[in-house]
Amino acid sequence: MVPPPAGKTQIPMTIPTLLMLPPRGGHSTAEMWMADARLAAARDLLARLKHVDQASPLYILAADAEDRHLLRGDADILTPSGVDEFSFGRELAERAPRSGMFAYFGGASAPLLTSEALRVIYQNMLDTQLPSALVNNKHSTDWMLLRDASILPSIAPSLPNDNALGWVLEYEAHQAVFGQSACAATRCDLDTPADVCIAAVHPQAGEHLKAFLRGHPVDLMTRCEAVQEVLRTPASSLALIGRTSAEAWQRLVRETQIWVRVYAEERGMVASGRLARGEVHSLLAASMDAMGMDAFLRELTCRVDAVLWDTRVWMAHHRSWPCDADRFAADLGWIDEIKDERLRQLTVAQRASTVPILCGGHGVVAGGLYALLEGAVHQPSR
C-alpha cells in the first residue's frame, strides 16, 4: 500500500466491532430457551458481519462461560473483567480502542439486519467527519457505530445497559447521534420469546435462528403466523395494547386494509423512572380488575381478530414485577411453568381465547409489529 503524503491523516478502512452477550440468567426452562435463542441470533449476526469487509476485527464478549465455549472459533473471544458483577458501561469502555472508530452490537440486537444493510451503515460511518454516532434508535439503543471511542470511559457510569447509549452520547458526550429509519431490521431486538418467534417468520431471519425454532417447536410460532394472516386479510381487526407509538400503528394503517384498535399507555415508563418509582398507572389494567380477566378477554376478543399485547404495562400497574422465568413462560404460554398467580391467571385466560394473542414486552408492539407487517407483505395469503 502506498503511504499517505506527509502531513495527511490516513483514513481508516475498517472499524473494530464488539458483540456483547449478557449473562444467561436463571435456569428455568423458559430462561434457558431464551438464552439459546439469543445465542442463535448472535451467530447469525456474526456470520453476516464476516461478509462486511469494513467490520474488522470482530470480538465477542460473552458474560457466561457456556456461551464463550459455544462461540469459540467464530471470532476473538473476550472474557469479562470479573472485578464485580457485570457492568455494561465498564465492559464497553474497557474493550473499546483508546481512540478511533468503534462498533458495538448486542448479541441479539439485529436478527434481521442483512450483510448488505450492514455494509451501508459501516460505510456511512467511515465517510463521516463529524464527532458522531450511528445508532439503530436514539431513544432505545441496541447497537451503535461511534466515530471517537475515546469518549466512552467518561460516560461509562451513565450506561447501566445499552438502551441509554444514544441519549447519553448526545446529551452527555455531545456527539451528533443519527438514528436509523424505523423498520424491522433497525427495531427488532430479541428481548422476549415473542420477539424471537416474530423475527423467525420474517424473510430476513438468519439460518441459525430458524434452525433453533425448528428444533424447539412452540405454539407461539403458530400464533405469530395467525397474526400475519390477519394482517393480510382485508377488513380484519387488530388490537395493539401497551407502549406502541403513533409511527408504528399509522404505518400499519397505511400498509394494510384492516381496522386497528389502539390502547396505548405508559410509553417511556422505564426511561422516565416511573417503573422504578412505582408510578405506572394503566386504565386498561384497572378495567381488567373491575371486570375480571375472563370477562375482559371475552369483551376484547369478540371485537378483534388478533391482539398484540405489551403485558409489561399491566405488570407494572400491579407493582408486582414477575421474575424472568415467569415472564418468559407466560409469553410462551407455558402455564405450568408460571409461579406468579396473577400472571398465571392472565395466561390461562389468554390461552382460552378464540383469537391469536401475542404477549411480550415493548418489542411486540414496536419492532415486532414492523417485522410481522413486513413478513405479511412478503408472503401471500394462504
Image (spheres, helix red, strand yellow):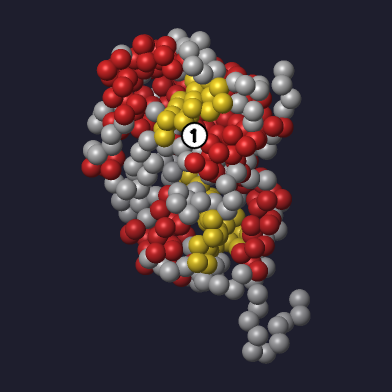
Residue drawn at x 60%, y 26% is: 258
Q: Look at the numbered disc 1 and give the secondary structure of its residue.
A: helix
Most foreground residue, 350 or 338 = 350
Asked if one can make out residue 108 in the rendered structure from this viewpoint, the answer is: no
Residue drawn at x 49%, y 16% is: 303
Residue drawn at x 28%, y 19% is: 289
Q: How many marks do you count on the picture? A: 1
Up the image or down, 320 lies above or below 75; here it is above
In percent of width and height, residue 237 lies at: 55, 22
- State the quadrant of the N terminus: bottom right
Identified by mark 1, the residue type is Val
- State the quadrant of the C terminus: top right
> In the orientation shown, which residue stands out farthest toward the bottom?
6
Up the image or down, 139 lies above or below 32; here it is below
Q: Which residue is mark 1?
A: 365
Left or right: residue 374 versus residue 134 is right
Residue drawn at x 43%, y 62% is: 169
Asked if one can make out residue 241 in the rendered structure from this viewpoint, the answer is: yes
In percent of width and height, residue 241 lies at: 44, 29
In percent of width and height, residue 285 lies at: 32, 25
